[in-house]
Image (tube, rainbow, N blue to C red):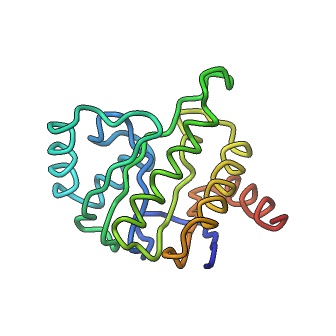
Amino acid sequence: MVINLILGDITKTKADAIVNAANTTLLGGGGVDGAIHRAGGITIVEECKKIIKKQGSCGVGESVITTAGNLPAKFVIHTVGPIWYGGTNNEDLLLTNAYKNCLQLAVENEVKKIAFPNISTGVYNFPKERAAKIAINSVLDFLNTSSILEEIIFVCFDKENYVIYENILNTK
C-alpha cells in the first residue's frame, strides 16, 4: 500500500476513483465540487439527481458513488464534509466519517487507487492542519482493516495544503 502526495488538479488525476468534496445537494458548487462537475460533464449530474431523488440529500459525513463521466477516473465518490463551527458540532468525527465512508465505498467497488482532495478546508473553513491530520489518520486506520486498496493519493490544489500534508506524512 502506497500513500502519495501531489500538488495539482484532482480532475486530471488518474485513479480508479476520485473523491468530490460535495455539498448535501450533490449538484455541484464552488471549489473542487464545481470543478469535478464541470470536467466530468452531464453524466455525473444526472447520476447525482437520481441519487437525490431516491434518498434525498447526502448527509454530512456520508458518501455516494457515481461514474466519472469525462474524467480520467472510473468513479467519483461524493462526500459531504462538515462546515467548521469552531469544533463544537462534532466536526472532527464528521470529517473522519467522510473519509472512512469514501474508503468503504471504494472497497465495495473494487477500487485499487483513490485520490482525495482537501475536504472541508475551502469555503467550509475547517482548519487545514487539523483536517490534514484527520485525513491521514483516517486513511491509516482504515488501511489496518483492508488490504484491497493499493494506492491513496492526496491531491492538494494549493502549496499551503501540500506543505501541511508533506510535514504530517514525514512524521508517520
- Outermost residue to the front: 145
Residue 89 position within the rendered picture, expressed as x and y whole percent measured from the top left: 60, 22
Q: Residue at x 54, y 47 (%)?
A: 119
Residue 147 position within the rendered picture, expressed as x and y whole percent measured from the top left: 54, 75
Residue 69: quadrant of the picture: bottom left
Residue 139 position within the rendered picture, expressed as x and y whole percent measured from the top left: 61, 60
Q: Residue at x 63, y 73 (%)?
A: 4
Q: Is 80 drawn above or below residue 149 in the view shown?
A: above
Q: 65 or 12: nearer the eye? A: 65
Q: 127 or 62: nearer the eye? A: 62
Q: Is 88 drawn above or below residue 77 in the view shown?
A: above
On the rendered structure, is 65 left or right of 142? left
Residue 107: quadrant of the picture: bottom left
Q: Is 137 drawn above or below residue 60 in the view shown?
A: below
Q: 99 or 130: nearer the eye? A: 99
Q: Residue at x 81, y 61 (%)?
A: 167
Residue 26: quadrant of the picture: top left
On the rendered structure, is 57 left or right of 85? left
For the N terminus, the quadrant is bottom right
Q: Residue at x 50, y 39 (%)?
A: 81
